[in-house]
Amino acid sequence: MTVRRVAIGGVFFVTVLIAAVLAREGRDAQPLPGPPLRALAAQRGIAIGTAVRGIEQRNNRAYRELIAEQFSSVTPENEMKWYALEPHRGRFTYNYADMVVDSARKAGQQLRGHALVWFDQLPRWLIGLGSDELRAATENHIRQVMGHYAGRVGVWDIVNEAILDHGGLRRSPFLDKLGPGYIGEAFKIAHAADPKAKLFINEIGAEGINAKSDRLYEIARGLKASGAPIDGVGFQAHLNLRGVPTTFVDNMRRFEALGLEIHITEADVALRLPVTAGKLRGQAGVYRRIVDDCLAVKACKSLTFWGFTDSGRSWIPETQPGMGAATLLDEQLKPKPAFFSVQRALGG
Ligand code: XIL
C-alpha cells in the first residue's frame, strides 16, 4: 500500500469518526431568548430544577447544554431508583447516576436524590423478602446509597408516594412487611447515613387540601413530634388543564407552619393530544400559577419540572394514554408559551 493510500484511508476514517460523533452528539442548543430561568430564580431566592435522563444527557448535546444553562437543580429521573442502583442484592451500580451527578456538579447545580423508599421500580429480588430480610435490605440500601453520595447530593426524597387518594397508606412491600413505622425508620436510617442531607417526604396528588394531603400532614406532624429527622415535604404537582388546586398555597402554609421546607418536585402540565394553540395558552397559565404559588410561600425553596422538553419518550403516555406535551419546550427544544410564562413569572 502506498503512503498516499494510507493517508487517504486515514482522512476517510477520521471523517467518518467525526461524522459519527456529530450524529450522536447532535447540534448545539438554539439559545433560548431572555435570561436563563436559573438566574431569574436565584433573584427570587429559589432553586429551579428539572428531571434529567442520564443517557439523553450523555448523547444529546443540545439537551445537555440547556440543562446547564437554564437550571440550578437536577433530579435524576430514574437513575437513583432502587432497581437502577441495586439491581442485584448488595451489588450497587452507580454509573448512570454518577454521570448525572458529575454533570450537575460541573454546572454548579444542586441535586435532589430520588427516591429511596418507594413502592414502584423495585428490583425483583426485593419483592419476596421476609420482614427481617427486608428491614436489613432497606437499611443497607439507604446507608450505601446515601453514603456514596454524601457531600454531593444535598436533598433526598426518602419516602415517596406512601399515601392513597382516600388517605390510607399505600400497600407496598414496606408497608406490608415492616408496618406503618417504616416511614419513620427510613428517616432515622437516612439521617444516620448522611447527617448533612435534607430529608424529604414526597407525594403525588397532595397539592390541594384533600384526604391525601390531610394524611400527609398528620404523618409529617407525627414525624416532627417524635423527633424524626424530616426537613421537608415535596409536592410533585403532576397537573393538567384542570389547573392548580385553589387550596395549594393554604396547604403549603400548614406544612410551613410545622417548620418544614417545601419543594415542588415534579411539576408538569399534561395536555390531551393533539396540541392546539388554545391548549398551549392554557398550559402556560397553569405553569404561571405553579410558579406564583411557590413564590407566595416563604418555605417553598425549590421548583423542579419533571423534564423540560416534549422530545423523547415521556412518562405521561405510559400512565395516561392520549396525554402528553407536558413540558416547557417542544420536541425541537423550542420554547412553548409555558416557557415564556415561567420566565415572566420568575422575573415578576
Ligand atoms: C417516572 C419516570 O418519569 C418514568 O420514566 C418511569 O418510567 C416511571 O417513573 N412520580 C415519581 C416519579 O415519583 O419517579 C415518576 O417518574 C413519575 C411519578
Image: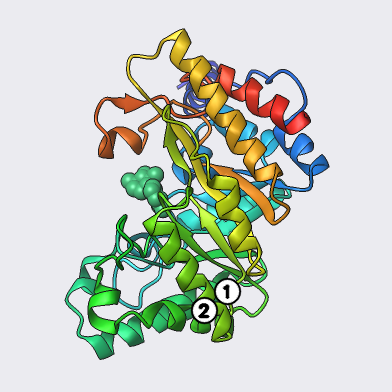
Residue at x 24% of width, y 86% of height: 131
Residue type, label 1: Ile
Residue at x 72% of width, y 25% of height: 344
| Residue 180 location, quadrant | bottom left
Residue at x 49% of width, y 19% of height: 282
Report, in whole angstroms, how far the alpha carbon at label 1 lies from the one at label 2: 7 Å
Left or right: where 171 falls relative to 116 = left
Q: Is residue 310 above or below residue 142?
A: above
Residue 7: x, y in percent?
55, 20
Answer yes or no: disc 2 within 8 Å of ligand 1: no
**Which quadrant of the rendered structure holds the N terminus?**
top left
Q: Is residue 170 above or below residue 203?
A: below
Question: Which residue is denoted by mark 2 in the rendering?
Answer: 223
Residue farthest along the top direction in this orientation: 277
| Residue 160 location, quadrant | bottom left
Residue 312 circle label: none
Residue type, label 2: Leu
- Disc 1 to disc 2: CB gap under 8 Å: yes
Q: Name the residue nearer the viewer: 58 or 5.
A: 58
Residue 277 in view: yes
Sequence-wise first label, 1 or 2: 2
Number of other residues with Cα within 10 Å of mark 2, as a class: few under 14, some 14 to 19, many 20 or more? some
